[in-house]
Amino acid sequence: MEAWETEVGWECTSPVQRAEFITPHMRSGINRIKEIEDSAPAISDL
């Protein structure tokens, strides 16, 4: 959260700048969720 305030914040930045800052963080989180989901056993196998 501190990085958000020091690098982007809500003042003096555009929505595009905020999106460019947060997108890589979201993408890595989504990729991690996909990895966990892919490694889980199928319900039909339980």
Image (tube, helix red, strand yellow):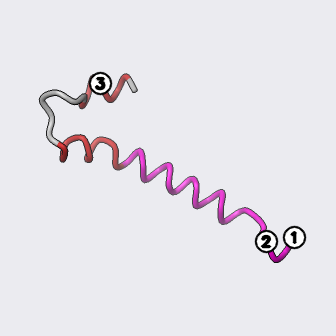
- Mark 1 to mark 3: distance in Å? 46 Å
Per the rendered image, the range of residues in magenta is 24-46
- Judging by the rendered image, the residue that carries numbered circle 3 is 5
- Judging by the rendered image, the residue that carries numbered circle 1 is 46
Q: Main secondary structure of the magenta part?
A: helix
User: Dot 2 lies on which element?
Assistant: helix
**In the displayed structure, would residue 46 be above or below residue 1?**
below
**In the displayed structure, would residue 15 be above or below residue 38?**
above
- Judging by the rendered image, the residue that carries numbered circle 2 is 43
- 34 falls in the magenta region: yes
Residue ID at (35%, 26%):
3
- Mark 1 vs 3, N-terminal side: 3
- Mark 2 to mark 1: distance in Å? 5 Å
Figure quadrant of the C terminus: bottom right
Q: Are marks 1 and 3 in contact (CB under 8 Å)?
A: no
* Closer mark to the observer between disc 2 and disc 3: 2
Q: Nearer the viewer, residue 33 or 44?
A: 44
**In the displayed structure, would residue 11 be above or below residue 27?**
above
